[in-house]
Image (spheres, rainbow, N blue to C red):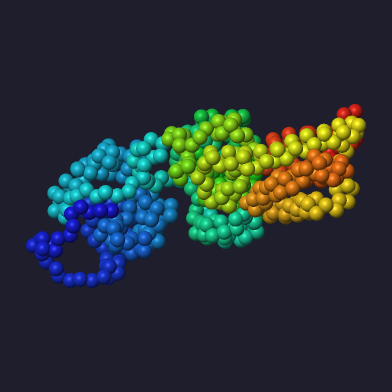
Amino acid sequence: MNNKKKWNPAMAAELYTLEKTFVGSDLVGKKYKPLFDYFADPATTPECKNYFRILSDNYVTDDAGTGIVHQAPAFGEDDYRVCLAHDVIYKGQEIPCPVDSNGMFTSQIPEVAGVHVKKADETLIGIIKQTGRLVQKDQLEHSYPFCWRSDTPLIYKAVPSWFVKVEEIRDKIVENNKKTYWVPNQVKEGRFHSWLTDARDWAVSRNRFWGTPIPIWCNDDLSEVVCIGSVEELHQLSGVKVTDLHKDVVDAITIPSKTKPGEVLRRVDEVFDCWFESGSMPYAQKHYPFENKEEFENGFPADFIAEGLDQTRGWFYTLMVLSTALFDKPAFKNLIVNGLVLASDGKKMSKRLKNYPDPNVVISKYGADALRMYLINSPVVRAESLKFQESGVLGVVKEVFLPLYNAFRFFVQNMERWESINSNIKFVPSPEKVRATENPTDVWISAATQGLIKFVHEEMAAYRLYTVMPALVRFVTQLTNWYVRLNRDRLKGLEGGDDEAETGLQVLYDVLLDVTILMAPFTPFITEYFYQHLRKLQPSYAQSADGGGSSNPV
């Protein structure tokens, strides 16, 4: 915040008499006369006896402005927290809020009633001046939140809401988080743990039309409240059988009051926060507890979920809160946290700005496998951000897929050559010949393949994608740049004769098949192409064509 008019001691001496200096803490607890007289009359605002006191909190600093901040609990998160902590307000109280849902002042501020808050400044400044309370009028430049869709200024405003009492089960949530396994672990132990230990009651209601209606029926003064647990329960209490649970349908349903005969209960106006529905996914997808009870219980908690880092305070959190509240256990066992994919300039990808290449075009040019491998082999799988570069996708094609395809094609060409010069004897894969070879490069590449298989299985069991792909890329380089090149003449039959050529081809086939199967979860399309050709060489392939045997490699 920059005040264009600097403090002028000489002018201050003309206007004010300095009587005493003291530190800010000396003022804490003292009452003061407010700038405006609204909400200061005990007759209309009994709670005002707690208002207009000087408080202290460490979120206020002296590096901007005066170091003195007015607290308006309806218009700021810190304001609400500080006022709550110092008993200026309390939970459940209707706090002072003279602004309506359209951003207009209400009749509580008669001089500007019906005026938008951004257009009322001059009138309010005039009132301060008339009462002799104006010290300085100036314009200050500072950051301000704007709607990212419409670029219009936002107003931070508290609204009455329905809450889940998260604070009552906070310790259980923290303990359940310890039972889960995260990759990378620092997100669980750091960012997520810190969020959980400071978790507050969760506002689950929203003032919108589209959304799942909150199933709460009550009377006008909330002295009688009924939370409906099923369509059948609603039918029993209201006499209305519904099949459509949208707001426009259920809002018309009333429930006779049990405490005040003749009166009815009506549904509250709010709908659920969509994150409540996301957190309910494990149960909603099975229609639990009304259906699939055994299936749900056998599959809960989920073995594995994955989502972006931004879900630390979103889906990951709501899953944990609701599963703890319902079952006192986490909703998942293992979790991979993805980083965010940003535009090439490091900014958030935006449909409006169109600052990223069309994914359909990228897939058409390079293939889905290349895009998938580029992302899996990036900082994204370590919960770090990635500046997306189309050239990186091209790099995967050039450095991995083309060399691997060339090795596959080289094998097919030389296998067909070997068959043609051996009186059309068919090449038959033989694991025994692979194990029997004494060629050092054969032994080396076979050992490297088995080492890779062991490594990938171990790392995948630990959900560490970020170690798997670099290992696969290194192996493809060893296979294509070293093994194939060193054995090129041998595989062509130009070195060691046809027997050595067959042995080399057996080893190359075995390696290509193992790598194809190993890479299939990451690059399913190109590996499926390889596999459909390699499997035809298996003896069992002909049997499967006649409806028997197995076409899978032994």
Q: On screen, 76 above or below 505?
A: below
Q: Position of residue 55 (x, y in %)?
A: 32, 63
Query: In front here: 489 or 362?
Result: 489
Does any portion of residue 509 appear in the rendered image?
Answer: no
Residue at 36% x, 63% y is 57
Most foreground residue, 479 or 394: 479
- Give percent across and percent down for residue 292: 73, 40
Res. 458 visible in picture: yes
In the figure, 533 relative to 314: above or below? above
Q: Nearer the viewer, residue 296 or 527?
A: 527
Q: Position of residue 158 (x, y in %)?
A: 39, 47
Q: In which quarter of the image is residue 238?
A: top right
Left or right of 287? Residue 414 is right
Q: Which quadrant does the C terminus fall into?
A: top right
| Residue 113 % position (x, y) | 26, 39
Give the tally of numbered discs.
0
Residue drawn at x 36%, y 60% is: 59
Could you tell whether 225 is left or right of 91 in the image? right
Residue 131 versus residue 24: which sits nearer the camera?
24
Question: Which residue does the image show at 52% across and 32% down from the upper left?
Answer: 358
Identify the residue at image location x=60%, y=58%.
Answer: 185
Left or right: 369 as drawn, with respect to 193: right
State the image quarter where residue 3 is shown. Answer: bottom left
